[in-house]
Amino acid sequence: MATPSALEKWKAQLRDDGKAALRALLNGTASLARLSAAEPEDAVDTILASEPRDSDVVRGFDRGCAELLEEFRSTLLQQEGRSFRIELAKLVTLVTIIRRLLPEQTVADLHRRYVLWSGFFENFVVDRGLDLRREYFRILALSQDVAADHGLEPRRLMPLWLSVCAESGDAGRYDASYLRVALLGLRRLPLGDDFDANEDFALQGLARWAVTQRPSTAAFEREWRILEGDFPRDAGFWTDRVQAAITAAERELSERTKGAETTFPIAAWWREDVDIHPGDHSLRGAGANEPPAREAREAILRDIGGALTNVAPRIDTLMKGHRRYADTTGDVFYLVRTACNIGMRLLENGPQVEKAERGALAASLANLAFDYDPVNVFAWSLMRDALAAAGRIADAELVGWEAIRRFPENHQWRTQLATVLTVYSGKAEEAAALLRETIALFPEEPYARNQLATVLADDMRRTDEARHVLDGAIAEGVADDATRSLLQKLDQGRALRRVRPQAVAVEDASTLTLPTAMARRQLFLFESGLSSEDGLRVFLADTPQDSYATYVSERAGLSDIPFKTTFAIAFEDALEKAEPSALRALVARGRPMERAIVEEAVAVSEGRVVAFSEFLADAERDERLQNLERTLQQQGGSEDRRTLLLRDFAASTLSTSVVSLVAA
């Protein structure tokens, strides 16, 4: 009998113990004979090329990939020093192998447990060269058909790809290299029985990128020509489709800017390129899809205060029409706007006895908006208020904390959560601490001071402290008419709050899955002295280690990763060193928006606040940066408030794709 070759032995090991075989490959100890000098992914591809998909060797490889990924997820972030860097390099190699071979069960799990895996891979976004989140997204894009074959919703990732398109670039949350991945995801959406191609979805993604990132004509043309090449059609094929994508983008831009902007720079060039002449902005194709008529929405809004049993079926019919339109065209604007508008009006109208039912319906509308636009600010606000109305107070709190985490530059999320904490949850002490921190961070905002005084007087019976807060607001010139009215009520011995809304007790087994929100609350409790270091440590030990949980551990001083794998953690580390040189070192590795944050931090350390437009050309178009800039320019507050705002802003970009809202 012939002696098995080294290659055959490794192949047999791959069949019998895939994890051990792959670990040997990653360690560089596998004997692969003539393939020993090949890149690991090339070697594995060559070895498996002759194997049927259902062979024991392929199955062993698949199991090995899944088991090794689990091992890395459980142990990598606990490694120290040189071991961490070595193991991270091995994880990068494993991800490369998985991307190349797409082992079926492994990639199905990467899709199915998206929340878990996206949170893990986001821990390793160092720079354009080392970005495992991007490579994870690439695996998802390439394997959408596999996920559909395993029973997952075929086109469920469409909103993710559209949002990544919009956020890929200097002024976005993602590096510019993500655009190609997102467009790939749109092009590779499973077709199923309803579609014969994905041109419209890819065009929507390209249009979103053009609106938000304002690329040069040359940069846009490069991406547009690639897209044209992926879908070879005759010359007239693109005209109506491009016009529909541009029109949808212009409508959304006009709505978002309240009419200040009605088009975007590249629109004219794009129209001309597909022979749409000036003034000819109508859709000529007879089969052009249209959203449900506006009159249907207006009629529902007129009747929204009537019996819910009459209006609910009409809402359902309308939203089904919007879903069909969004699923067919990729234009999600009308669906999201309609869901949020109707949801808010449901909460504002109707009899008290329907409050819980209206809250539940509004929450389902918010959930629908999230399905199609997971970063929509109005959907976050609607979800929090709807859950509170439905009696799901703990869930409403979680949404409130997540909104604070994602949008730390806006004080309104804090005061709105404080209302939920006091009026619905009975957590007056926590609300008071949150409002004190809000006053320290936003010293020129009177509402938080008035609200704190109300909580102190009405909920905690500490009228002397309430009076001190109001007197302080007047002395500092941060009072309004409400401040003086509250002082007058104190003098008269009256309650400061007008009417306390009644929470509706509802038994509901459905709860939100928002570990990042829980982590944000625990960080607040720890930093405000309401919980101990041990309490935070216990919480983090039981929490999936996504990038935000890792950040919380680093910020609280509970861990010290030897290699700062995200900008937020590296920024935190540089601030702790309190040396401008440490901050300056981040400029070389940071993206344009990150560099702007670093430059602002340097200016703040020197006692200055500089307009972000000096560091980032697109800053004036970024609403969040403008809000942050206005807040930084406020006078007073705690000594380190500007630095804290910058820290929170840097961390707000972490784990933003980790959303699982079970609301309906």
Image (tube, rainbow, N blue to C red):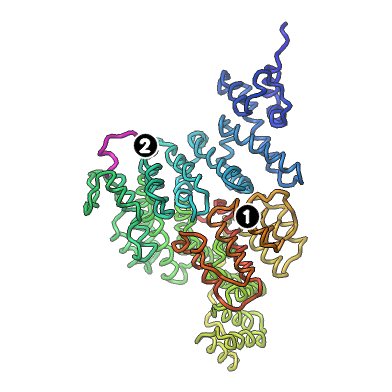
- Which residue is located at x 73 percent, y 10 percent? 3
Q: Which mark is residue 430?
A: none
User: Residue 238 colored magenta?
Assistant: yes
Nearer the camera: disc 1 or disc 2: 1
* Three-letter code for the amino acid on which mark 2 is drawn: Ala
Dot 2: within a 10 Å radius of its alpha carbon, few (fewer than 14), some, or many (20 or more) residues?
A: some
Reading the image, the residue beneath label 2 is 197
- Which residue is located at x 75 percent, y 57 percent? 558
For marks 1 and 2 on the same chain, the one whose residue lies earlier in the sequence: 2
- Which residue is located at x 26 percent, y 37 percent? 235
* Three-letter code for the amino acid on which mark 1 is drawn: Leu
Reading the image, the residue beneath label 1 is 586
Q: Quadrant of residue 443?
A: bottom right
Magenta residues, start to end: 229-239
Q: Is residue 167 left or right of residue 295?
A: right
- Comparing 520 with 29, the one in front is 29
